[in-house]
């Protein structure tokens, strides 16, 4: 139709300004979706017509404004939030990203006083949405569910905030939250934010040792947890893990005298829970007694909001620190545009609040928009692989945001689990955490979304606070596997090894020029590591740690980490962390860990292990090494493969040549490259010979 043609015409001016695009005709003619990787997939004219950003032209205008006048662009957005005191107009943004010019520092809206909890909850009630559902909760078992309106959410948040104040938690104090996906998790985050306390959520799949490490680093006033949770058929006794972590922290000089424990009755009764009366308190016994109103602590835009530990290239996790004002604007704005949010949406993000996605896009971003959010306690394949679509139909979910690993695992289980359900409510799909391979993209698009729903493949990081490169669903055609174009205010650059910016079609290291409001401000207690890791590799830029290419149309394609970090099922794991867990095993002399392609997880963990002299290889030892990693980090970091290594390929100066290990792990033996610089080239043959053991 002529409408459709006009639509495609308007889309042909790509955001990059690259000019006309190829392959339009096939799509205009409504042919079946392309088989080629680089084909373009257009949003429907109806979708674009109603979208917040409906054409490349509109995007380009907004984007250019955001780059030329960031202060004006973000101030206008800031005006739509509540500020107790306005920021200093001359200090909308102050930054130095260039280590050669002095300490790196970033601040936005300095001097402004606000509160993210107030903006995410109270403000929606004041605008007349108190009776709107803020959160639906779907439990592990089908049929187990709950919901809270914005007014009810506020009451729950206030009760907990009052309790926290009563036990001496105040502005600037850290609180560790170790909870599964109960509504109490976002409630606890919001309660901390309300009183200016700094929350640090630890994913409830981390082991006692990892939890202890985080407790020792941030010295919380209390730990909030629950007694147990069921994931599928498997119970996990979280309180036991906290008990062990608190013993371990005590040994390291940090003692926490209070453990607020939610009784998660469907998983475990309180009578069965191990208890230390002088330290442990049941949430249901105390919190419910507190008033349902609690004054807000107005904080500076630059006061810390939360700490979230993430993996880096050394063994010690990094405490990424986000502040209040800029993060608030950034998560709200990215959520709104990348999902083309409208007030009638029912939004479901499958991420756990233990990761950044759950912070920015389960809790803050959606609530700041007054959205209705679904929180799911269980797993996507329990009771069977149709669970997600059962939930989508039950709540009429309109926006479904998940990780490629989930898409791949459901894809493997078969389309019949999907097509059994209607999924008619779906409007926009989202992907995050790792590159989505074009075949998974197409399955998600064609099968889950019935070739109807645009996919927002959002590239970002714990450090960036919110989306950096992401489709705006109605604005331009998509290419399966590409995160498309930068969000407003974001200036990605691709640099070569020497840190020179490369223009046009190219590949290299992805850096960001200039700050954006959601950027992290430091690593907790270690500003030097912040500068060294992120700003020293390429002076003047924030270095993301990711490789990236840009095609002739200006689309960005993320190609994965270029540092010693691997991405397993969208979980970021430092190879050094796994190595240090392995070498803590008394029979392990040395270990080297690399990522290897994995059909479902994206990357699997492949560990080369050298044993202490005289110790024989055995299946029992292999298992015990894996258990060591599970205990020290968590089950999600368990190696997929242990490769016995009589020695490791090292240079004469003793550096392990991981390039060679990666090739051996991937069985690309004809691509080993030059091994002549190794101290002992014979090691390589020994390793190859042991590959199948
Ligand atoms: O390698 C990129 C990958 O995940 C890393 C960030 O991990 P984390 O801080 O745990 O945050 C995950 C959720 C934002 C990035 O450096 N990554 C994340 N999203 C994408 C991605 N890679 C490709 N495409 C994405 N959409």
Image: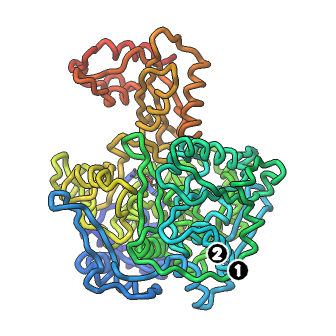
Q: Vertical placement of 527 versus 338: above or below?
A: above
Q: Position of residue 535 (x, y in %)?
A: 25, 55
Residue drawn at x 25%, y 62% as measured from the top left: 104
Q: In the figure, is residue 222 to the left or right of 609?
A: right
- Is residue 398 something one can see in this rendering? no
- Is residue 17 something one can see in this rendering? yes
Q: Is mark 2 within 8 Å of ligand 1?
A: no
Cβ atoms under marks 2 and 1 closer than 8 Å: yes
Q: Position of residue 132 (x, y in %)?
A: 66, 82
Q: Is mark 1 within 8 Å of ligand 1?
A: no
Q: Vertical placement of 282 versus 203: above or below?
A: below
- Number of marks in picture: 2
Q: Which residue is mark 2?
A: 162
Q: Position of residue 599 (x, y in %)?
A: 52, 39
- Quadrant of the rendered image containing residue 686: top left
Q: Which residue is mark 1?
A: 291
Residue drawn at x 38%, y 55% as measured from the top left: 525
Relative to the observer, which residue lies in front, 502 or 627?
627
Mark 1 neighbour density, 10 Å: few (under 14) some (14–19) many (20 or more): some
Q: Position of residue 341 (x, y in %)?
A: 52, 76
Q: Quadrant of the N terminus?
A: bottom left
Q: Secondary structure at mark 2?
A: helix
Q: In the figure, is residue 112 to the left or right of 239?
A: left
Q: Secondary structure at mark 1?
A: loop
- Quadrant of the rendered image containing residue 164: bottom right
**Which badge, 2 or 1, comes first in the chain's sequence?**
2
Residue drawn at x 29%, y 68% as measured from the top left: 106
Outermost residue toward the top in this view = 614
Relative to the observer, which residue lies in front, 469 or 522?
522
The Cα–Cα distance between marks 2 and 1, rounded to whole angstroms, is 7 Å
Mark 2 neighbour density, 10 Å: few (under 14) some (14–19) many (20 or more): many
Residue drawn at x 55%, y 61% as measured from the top left: 175
């Amino acid at each position: 139709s002529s409408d459709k043609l006009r639509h495609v015409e308007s889309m042909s001016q790509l955001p990059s300004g690259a000019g006309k695009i190829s392959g339009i005709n096939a799509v205009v003619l409504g042919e079946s979706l392309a088989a080629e990787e680089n084909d373009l997939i257009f949003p429907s004219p109806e979708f674009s017509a109603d979208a917040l950003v409906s054409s490349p032209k509109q995007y380009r205008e907004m984007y250019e404004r955001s780059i030329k006048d960031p202060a004006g662009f973000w101030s206008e957005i800031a005006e739509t939030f509540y500020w107790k005191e306005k920021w200093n107009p001359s200090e909308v943004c102050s930054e130095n990203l260039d280590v050669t010019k002095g300490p790196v520092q970033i601040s936005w809206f300095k001097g402004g006083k606000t509160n993210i909890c107030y903006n995410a909850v109270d403000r929606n009630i004041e605008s007349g949405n108190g009776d709107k559902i803020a959160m639906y909760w779907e439990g592990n078992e089908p049929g187990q569910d709950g919901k809270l309106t914005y007014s009810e959410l506020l009451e729950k948040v206030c009760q907990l905030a009052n309790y926290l104040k009563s036990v001496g938690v105040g502005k600037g104090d850290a609180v560790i939250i170790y909870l599964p996906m109960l509504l109490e998790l976002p409630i606890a985050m919001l309660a901390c934010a309300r009183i200016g306390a700094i929350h640090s959520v630890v994913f409830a799949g981390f082991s006692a040792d990892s939890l202890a490490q985080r407790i020792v680093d941030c010295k919380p006033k209390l730990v909030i947890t629950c007694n147990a949770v069921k994931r599928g058929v498997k119970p996990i006794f979280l309180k036991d893990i906290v008990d062990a972590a608190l013993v371990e922290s005590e040994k390291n000089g940090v003692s926490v005298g209070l453990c607020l424990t939610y009784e998660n009755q469907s998983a475990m009764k309180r009578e069965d829970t191990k208890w230390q009366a002088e330290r442990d308190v049941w949430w249901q016994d105390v919190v419910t007694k507190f008033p349902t109103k609690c004054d807000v602590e107005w904080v500076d835009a630059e006061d810390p909001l939360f700490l979230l530990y993430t993996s880096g290239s050394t063994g010690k996790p990094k405490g990424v620190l986000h502040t209040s004002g800029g993060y608030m604007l950034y998560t709200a704005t990215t959520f709104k545009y990348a999902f083309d949010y409208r007030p009638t949406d029912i939004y479901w993000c499958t991420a756990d609040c233990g990761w950044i996605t759950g912070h920015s896009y389960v809790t803050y971003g959606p609530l700041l928009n007054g959205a209705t959010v679904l929180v799911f306690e269980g797993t996507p394949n329990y009771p069977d692989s149709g669970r997600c679509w059962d939930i989508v139909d039950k709540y009429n979910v309109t926006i479904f945001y998940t990780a490629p690993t989930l898409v791949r695992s459901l894809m493997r289980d078969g389309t019949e689990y999907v097509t059994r359900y209607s999924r008619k409510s779906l409007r926009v799909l989202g992907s995050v955490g790792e590159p989505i391979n074009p075949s998974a993209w197409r399955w998600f698009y064609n099968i889950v979304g019935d070739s109807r729903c645009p996919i927002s493949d959002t590239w970002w990081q714990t450090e960036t606070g919110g989306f950096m490169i992401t489709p705006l669903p109605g604005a331009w055609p998509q290419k399966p596997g590409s995160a498309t174009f930068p969000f407003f205010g974001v200036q990605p650059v691709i640099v070569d090894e020497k840190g020179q910016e490369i223009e046009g079609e190219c590949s290299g290291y992805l850096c960001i020029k200039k700050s954006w409001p959601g950027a992290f401000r430091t690593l907790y207690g270690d500003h030097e590591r912040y500068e060294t890791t992120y700003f020293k590799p390429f002076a003047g830029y924030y270095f993301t740690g990711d490789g990236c290419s840009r095609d002739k149309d200006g689309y960005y394609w993320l190609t994965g980490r270029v540092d010693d970090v691997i991405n397993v099922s969208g979980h970021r794991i430092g190879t050094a962390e796994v190595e240090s867990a392995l070498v803590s095993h008394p029979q392990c002399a040395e270990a080297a860990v690399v990522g290897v392609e994995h059909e479902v997880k994206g990357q699997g963990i492949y560990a080369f292990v050298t044993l202490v002299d005289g110790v024989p290889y055995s299946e029992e030892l292999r298992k015990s090494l894996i258990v060591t990693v599970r205990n020290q980090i968590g089950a999600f970091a368990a190696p997929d493969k242990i490769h016995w290594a009589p020695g490791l390929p090292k240079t004469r100066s003793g550096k392990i040549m991981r390039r060679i290990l990666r090739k051996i792990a991937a069985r690309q033996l004809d691509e080993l490259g030059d091994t002549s610089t190794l101290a002992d080239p014979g090691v390589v043959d020994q390793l190859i010979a042991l590959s199948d053991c």
